[in-house]
Image: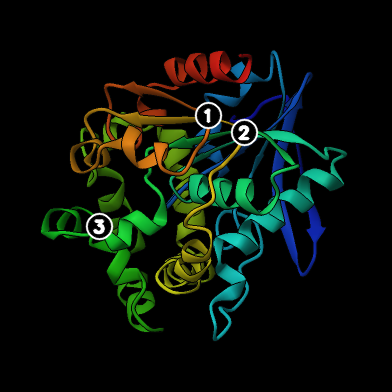
Amino acid sequence: MIFEGFRRGQLRVGDIDVNYVTAGQGPPLLLLHGFPQNLAMWARVAPVLAGDFTVVCADLRGYGDTSKPKCARDKSNYSFRAMAGDQVGLMKALGFDRFHVVGHDRGGRTAHRMALDHPNVVLSLAVLDIVPTYAMFTETNRHLALAYWHWYFLAQPEPFPERMIGADPDFFYETCLVGWGATKLADFDAELVADYRRSWRHMQMIHGSCSDYRAAASIDLEHDAADIDRKVACRTLAFWGSKGAMHRLFDMEAAWRKRCANLTTESLAGGHFFIDQYPAETAQILAKFLSG
């Protein structure tokens, strides 16, 4: 049973219901998952951190058991700005006006936008195995396009990717899990994979994940371009898998040094999903940073 001892709930934030689990005591800490997972990805990390922090794990808009609205024409309701607003609203409703935030993949992009839009809310920021969204699009070459082809597929107009994925969602999303370096399906906890499958087999989640990437290729780029000269002021950890595609294709430290005023870096010898591969080591590194 995952998240044993955690309290589960949903809270209305604006026009959506945000799903979360929480436990622990100490400074508040928000953990955000990435694509194509849900909050279950933190199930082997969160209990460790709950010894020193009040941990909240939440599903992003469009994923897991959080609401999955129809994508707006301008994609604004799936922007990282909207996703960050959801999570700030959740934490405020739980009684936390300021908190630490850790995000992997899409959760990391949401957390980065949160630190820009809500600098007085974010105590510290950790971004796991990503470079800034703006860099992902503006520094694309053939190697990046081959490794991260899904960015362009998922961003195609509805309903093309939804119908293709919906024909066999397990095959599609599991291909994503093992496609970004140094990971086999056997590296993932079977209980967590079962929960991912439960989520991604719903057409609403398929639409939500596509909408997320459509926003990234459009309105998120507008937001990032407007903030291109701003740096995140709070303590920031850039943390990545040294055997993954991100590390191979980018100078990770340099990419984040451009965008953060107070940067620390760490890595583990895994792929993009190093959290699933090395949960204990991930928790140890995060705890050290968050307590610093």
- Give the mark nearest the N terminus, 2 or 1: 2
Task: Examine the rendered structure and indicate whether residue 99 appears above or below residue 178.
Answer: above
The residues tagged by marks 2 and 3 sit, at their Cα atoms, a distance apart of: 26 Å
Q: Which residue is drawn at 74% across and 42% down?
A: 121
CB under 8 Å between discs 2 and 1: yes
What residue did someone put label 2 on?
Answer: 234
- Whichever of labels 1 and 3 marks the residue nearer the N terminus, that label is 3
**Rendered image: mark on residue 262:** 1
Classify mark 1: helix, strand or loop. Answer: loop
Inspect the image, locate mark 2, and give the three-letter code of the amino acid beneath it.
Cys
Question: Residue at position x 40%, y 34% from top?
Answer: 190
How far separated are the C-alphas under marks 2 and 1?
6 Å
Residue at mark 3? 139
- Give the structural element (helix, strand or loop) at label 3: loop
Q: Which quadrant of the rendered structure holds the C terminus? A: top right
Note whether 114 is above or below 160 in the view shown. above
- Residue 263 coordinates in the image, percent (x, y): 48, 28
Q: Distance between the residues labelled 1 and 3?
A: 24 Å
Q: Nearer the viewer, mark 1 or mark 3?
A: 1
Q: In the figure, residue 94 lies in which quadrant?
A: top right
Check disc 1 and give the amino acid type.
Answer: Asn
